[in-house]
Image: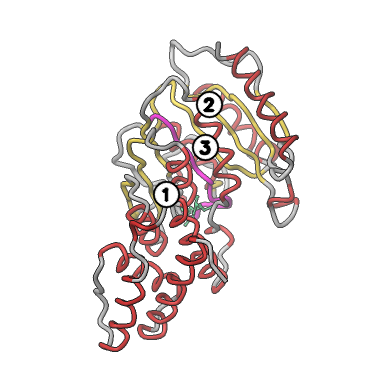
Amino acid sequence: MSHSPVETVFSMLNETSAALQDARAASFLEALADSGENWFLGEINQDIDEVLKKRLVKLYEDHPLEKFEKEEIRKAFQLAILKGMKEHIQPNHQMTPDSIAMVIGYLMDKFTQNDRELTLLDPALGTGNLVLAIMNQLRGKVAITHGVEIDEVLVRLAYVGANLTEQPLHLYNQDSLEPLFIDPADVVVSDLPVGYYPNDVRAADYELQAKEGHSYAHHLFIEQSIKHVKEGGYLFFLVPNGLFESPLAGELHEYLQKTVHIQGLLKLPTSLFKNEQSAKSILILQRQHEDVKPPKQVLLAELPKLSNAQAMQTMMAKIQHWMDTDKA
Ligand code: SAM
């Protein structure tokens, strides 16, 4: 039976990572980062026995990197990450699925149709899947992405993913709510971590700090992102559906009113999520600038099931119509 290129690359990454995991008593995700790096560098830098080394070299040589498309490699790498994530599930570390990345990429392309080149910032980079999928989709329009992530293993995976798909990704392994030494980006895109931010001292630097108790990380992330996008630049966030219904929604809304123009809120189909509570929307903002007018009408929509091609076509036509009337 013949396998698709994605299956072929996945099997190779899976086999090499499982072997490295055993030999080094590491987690599957750590071993996957090692294996991906070996494949990219064409050499093995781990301290392992010669028999295993030979076996790995043969597997990498049988799968020359240049034989595969960027999207085939990204998808295979993503499948291997998903397998590793099943080992220890951390709800706030979940990778952004391709289907959502594709919709955000489509919207970003539309909203920035007059730009030839973009710099991106993702302050919750995770594995990098969201930005790498968008960068592949936008084919060279993204000149560089700055990605910030607190978890070291995820940063390594993002680094390997960017190398394997030859995408320009600049990495910062730090807390994104600490000062960021990054020039303002043209666009911010992020699947925000949702929940409380434990560091009250740091939170005190933010206008959206909660008056009592811990602040919402996702609110602070929105404020930090607005500060790090150029005036007139767009922000695309994946946010919980209830963002504007929480007890602290009033403060958030007030802050947004004075810093950005809310462009759109698109509810994703619940079928993409485990349950109603974890369902999300895409929030689109534009940082205020003296030359930028607010939209005549905010783009509000419920996206249909992405598998329903006809309903998706109708939705895209609706979005296009909104763009034509609002951004003309
Ligand atoms: N888009 C990512 C992807 O495709 O893999 C997934 C993002 S995930 C929903 C949110 C990420 O935010 C997690 O990887 C988590 O480690 C990171 N994170 C949470 N708090 C953070 C902080 N204070 N600074 C930087 N990263 C943080």
Where does label 3 land, which residue?
A: 105
Q: Secondary structure at mark 2?
A: helix
Where does label 1 land, which residue?
A: 201
Write the residue at 35% across / 71% down: 62
Task: Using residue 62 as the reference point, say whether residue 280 is left or right of it.
Answer: right
Q: Three-letter amino acid code at disc 3?
A: Gly
Q: Is residue 124 above or below residue 297?
A: below
Where does label 2 land, which residue?
A: 110
Residues under numbered marks 3 and 1 in contact, where contact means CB atoms less than 8 Å apart:
no
Instruction: State whether label 1 is within 8 Å of ligand 1.
Output: no
Mark closer to the observer (3, 1): 3
Q: Which of the two labelled residues, at mark 3 and mark 1, occupies the earlier sequence position?
A: 3
The residues bearing labels 3 and 1 have C-alpha atoms spaced at a distance of 35 Å
In magenta segment, residue 230? no
Give the quarter of the figure containing the N terminus. bottom right
Give the quarter of the figure containing the C terminus. top right
Instruction: State whether label 2 is within 8 Å of ligand 1.
Output: no
Q: Secondary structure at mark 3?
A: helix
Image mark for residue 83: none
Where is residue 246, by image quadrant? top right
* Magenta span: 186-199
The residues bearing labels 1 and 2 have C-alpha atoms spaced at a distance of 39 Å
Q: Which of the two labelled residues, at mark 1 and mark 2, occupies the earlier sequence position?
A: 2
Instruction: State whether label 3 is within 8 Å of ligand 1.
Output: no
Please rate how many residues cluster around mark 2, counting C-alpha atoms within 10 Å: few if below 14, some from 14 to 19, many from 20: few
